[in-house]
Amino acid sequence: MGMEVQFMFRYVECIDAGSEYCPCYLAEHGECIICSQLKGKEFCDCLNWSGTCIYQEYLWNNEKGKKPRQFVKCRILSKQYIREDVFILKIKVPKSMARILDNIGAYVFLRKNNDDVVFSTPISVAESDPLAGVIKVMIKVNGIKTKAIDECSDFISVKGPYLNGIQGQRFIRDVNNGKMLFLIRGTAGISALMAAKKCIKDNEIDVLIDKGRHEKNFLEDYFSEVGCAVNRLSFLDEKGLSDEGKYKIKEYIKNKQYDVALSAGNDGFHSQIINYINKIDENIKFATVNNSIICCGEGICGSCTLSGISNSSIKSCKQQYNPMELFLKADGSDKICCKKDEECKL
Amino acid sequence: MKVVVIGGGWAGTAAAVEAKKAGADVVVLEKTDLLIGVGNVGGIMRNNGRFTAAEEMIALGGGELFNITDKCSRHVNINFPAHNHASLYDVTKVEPEVRRYLYKIGVDIIFEGRVVDVEKKGSKIEGVYLQDGTFIDGDVFIETTGSTGPMGNCVRYGKGCSMCILRCPSFGPRISISQRAGVEDILGMRGDDSYGAMSGSCKLNKDSLSPEIREKLNKDGVVVLKVPEEDVNMDKLKMKVCQQYALKEFAENVILLDTGHAKLMTSYYPLEKLRKIPGLENARFEDPYSGGKANSIRYLSMAPRDNTMKVIGIDNLFVGGEKAGLFVGHTEAIVTGTLAGLNAVRYGIGLKGAELPVSLAVGDIISYENKAKETKDGLRKRYTFAGAGYFERMKELGLYTADPEAIQKKVELLGLKGFYNQKLV
């Protein structure tokens, strides 16, 4: 485990590196995550080669970053409430955007037209149809930003595409003809829908879903429709993982050799799940829904900053890390602080 | 005892062969899908002092790779401006021979295995990480990753990526293991005080040359063509790595050598200008693919070392080839790589590293280069048995000879016969 845990912080990975949005503002200002020559150095020290030379791209682009993602006014094709506080929007977006959003971890910023940019809220994309140029998002109203979006009827401003909605993505992508365990609690499960759709083709997916305070979690049907085996339970109690939660998880893991577990909940949930599962089977890798506060998606505002080992810091809106490094406790001494201690029940 | 060789070029393969002979388990980690690196587009052996060096190595018992290049030679004992008794090997034949030999003697090779990081404990390397996260542990490490590129460096210090045989866009960039392990790289310089130097030759596709030139190349191995007066450019000589070929003759003439490709002894040559030369009207580049524009930049990444090839500051890391200094050439890579291979195993079993005596050219170049690069002036020079300043030194010190028997005797008298044939483990 020792070597593995070091991995992500050793290898810095930027979700946008090598894409059409690379090099970005960060490179332009000497703050590139990947390229040493665009981080103030004068020699190559490529840690995580993304397949293309970012420095070369930068020079070819007249020493400027590429045109950044901007808000576009998009038509809302339909709006449907599936619970009094949860609604689905189908939005017509440019096909090129829909193409990239048809991927694990996809999210967009949504904002009511004419609202100040501070109202931009990152929302996971549940489904994307690149041929039609239509995306489907599910939104739970629980605050000022989502209330504003609820007021949209014909049009909405969309900024995207962004892909860092799931951390530890590579662990899901690397599995072929394998077995995955999804643990869902709350609306974070929306972010797991795309992963289920993409992975079910070649893999077996078991979903353990928390019914929450309602009769059942509204996401259950979506998971079973794509082919996942869904089971309902109550994960947590006041102390942490409930007995039912622990029992069910252990039972599942003992019965199957899972390659990866995707945790879809808040950070406290991630911590519970990862620490518990790792004790049962240390070979299982983890992916988590990214709960960082994301305001710009470009690594500039700093809202999403996480502190890592030896004072390194991570822009979690752009950087991929290994969730084990963030959430796994080894004697509590090297637990990495995600600045949200109050959510962690362990 | 496990020896890990990082970089499967001429220096790395030489180190691997020697370490295997000495009895260690050896694995070579090679970034691309071919061994011998730039050796795949090289081919010049035994010219001037390299003849001496090759024979010394054979007499010392480290001649396996020289036997292969000799066997694969298209031309032997030819002369071209300022160079005598050269052998030109066939670049299309050598690599598979070397690969088969390494497999035959039991060396493990991991292709497309690019090392990206190092795990250290104190001043010892415990292992290295490949780009896919695989951890390779070992007792001793030999870094023979060369000093070329990667892309961003060729962009900053050269004329951009020329799509050379090292194929960074396909296989990823070279990283400096020694630097990653905490020892700062030394950078070579060139005349105008900028860093690095450009690789000194490119290759033309033989089929794109006129039948007359092709025939002459096949027959004689050398073709010398005049550069139109308006295009003679002396300045380009200052840029190149290969000072032994940075002579007036090479600026006023286009010198082609037959290595299977038509090796053009200049860093690069704008295609429009090249095609003005009779016989080259249809010429195109074989290597680097963009040889009309640029060539790769070298010497940006040398590790400080002692004369046993051990890196200063790390207990169990040895270097060879361009990683070990401002050396030019396959011969020089094999010479330094072989010594690194032997001393890696010696270190592994607790023996002190061995130095070659300076009464042999192969020993003298190692200590001479190390001392010379302490000065800025020395950093601007290159060290090769084939020419530049070092060949002159060889002649002055009486080290140069093209007499194999005399060399055999000399090595025997020094008590070094079989020096590279000892089984230590």
Image (spheres, rainbow, N blue to C red):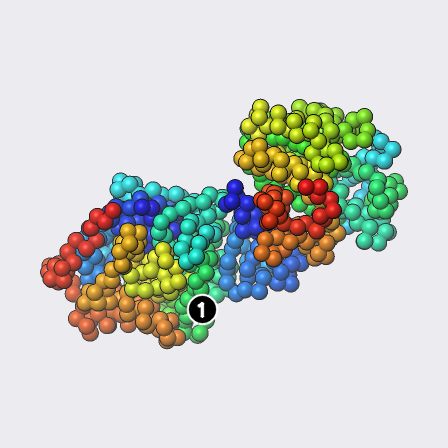
Q: Which residue is mark 1?
A: B195
Using the rendered image of the protein, determine whether residue B214 is visible from the camera's viewpoint: no
Q: Residue at x 65, y 27 (%)?
A: A247
Quadrant where the C terminus of chain A sits is top right
Relative to A244, B327 lies left or right: left
Of residues B247 and A319, which is closer to you in this image? Answer: A319
Q: Quadrant of residue A150?
A: top right
Residue type at mark 1 is Tyr
Give the image location of residue A86, x and y in percent.
83, 35
Mark 1 Cα-neighbour bin, 10 Å: few <14, some 14–19, many ≥20 = many
Q: Residue at x 46, y 55 (%)?
A: B175
Mark 1 chain:
B
Q: Residue at x 15, y 56 (%)?
A: B417
Using the rendered image of the protein, determine whether residue A138 is visible from the camera's viewpoint: yes
Relative to A151, B204 lies left or right: left
Give the image location of residue B341, x and y in percent.
29, 53
- Secondary structure, mark 1, is loop
Of residues A247 and A197, which is closer to you in this image? Answer: A247
Give the image location of residue B33, x and y in percent.
40, 44
Give the image location of residue A10, x and y in percent.
54, 51
Residue A218, compared with residue B219, is above or below; it is above
Q: Residue at x 25, y 47 (%)?
A: B425
